[in-house]
Amino acid sequence: MTHVFPRIGRHPIGTLNQLDVLQCLEAISLSGTRETAIRTRESIQRIYARAVTLGLLEPGKNFMAKGVADFKLRTHVTRHHATILEPQKIGQLMRDIRGYKGHYIVCCALQVMPYVFQRPGQVRMMEWGQLELLDAGIWVCPPSIMKLRKVHKEHPQTQPHIVPLPSQVVDILRGMYKVTGPSGLNRTGF
């Protein structure tokens, strides 16, 4: 009801019309939370039914009755993020990343990202104990740093994510190991 009170909460239930409620629900739906709008509509339907039961509203004025107020809500238009599709521009991005003159660890992370296709937070939380750089060239990404619900992160049967590391990434990480050592850098330094 957090979304409802600012819009229609100050009006008595008998003075509201279907358009007022519909505009309120569509504002919720168009903000990208369509499921919240549907649950809110159901809550408003229960409020109207209770008002009829208590005699605060005439049954004929209950435009929120089930079957009557099951109107369709417009959906939020999903926007896709831009991506590079031309090989020349991808090459330019890789050259720009290699030419970046920031902190050494940040440079290494930027160079690793295009090869492993992992979330930035996962790369940031990578630890030396998760890496096998000598023989296999793999990163065993534990569930604790993956994008999962907490219950799945903590579940003992949730499998780690195995990320193969190409030789370029292995070389970058070996160079980084010389700087950070086995304990890594203090995480607050990023």
Image (cartoon, rainbow, N blue to C red):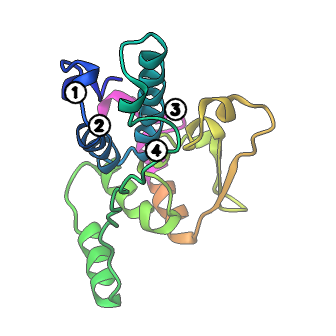
Which sits earlier in the primary sequence, circle 1 or circle 3?
1
Which sits earlier in the primary sequence, circle 4 or circle 2?
2
Q: Looking at the picture, how far across and down is residue 127, in whole percent?
A: 55, 40
Q: Residue at x 65, y 34 (%)?
A: 153
Q: Amino acid at mark 2?
A: Val
Q: Looking at the picture, how far across and down is residue 100, in whole percent?
A: 22, 63
Q: Is residue 52 above or below residue 145?
A: above
Dot 1 corresponds to which residue? 8
Q: Nearer the viewer, residue 167 or 8?
A: 8
Which sits earlier in the primary sequence, circle 3 or circle 2?
2
Say whether marks 1 and 2 touch (CB < 8 Å): yes
Dot 3 corresponds to which residue? 183
Measured Cα–Cα span from mark 3 to mark 2: 58 Å
Which quadrant holds residue 156?
Answer: top right
Measured Cα–Cα span from mark 4 to mark 2: 13 Å
Q: Using the image, tell me which numbered label, if any, was put on residue 21.
A: 2
| Foreground tag (4 vs 2) | 4
The magenta stretch is 176-190
Q: Using the image, tell me which numbered label, if any, was put on residue 68.
A: 4
Quadrant holding the C terminus: top left
Which quadrant holds residue 101?
Answer: bottom left
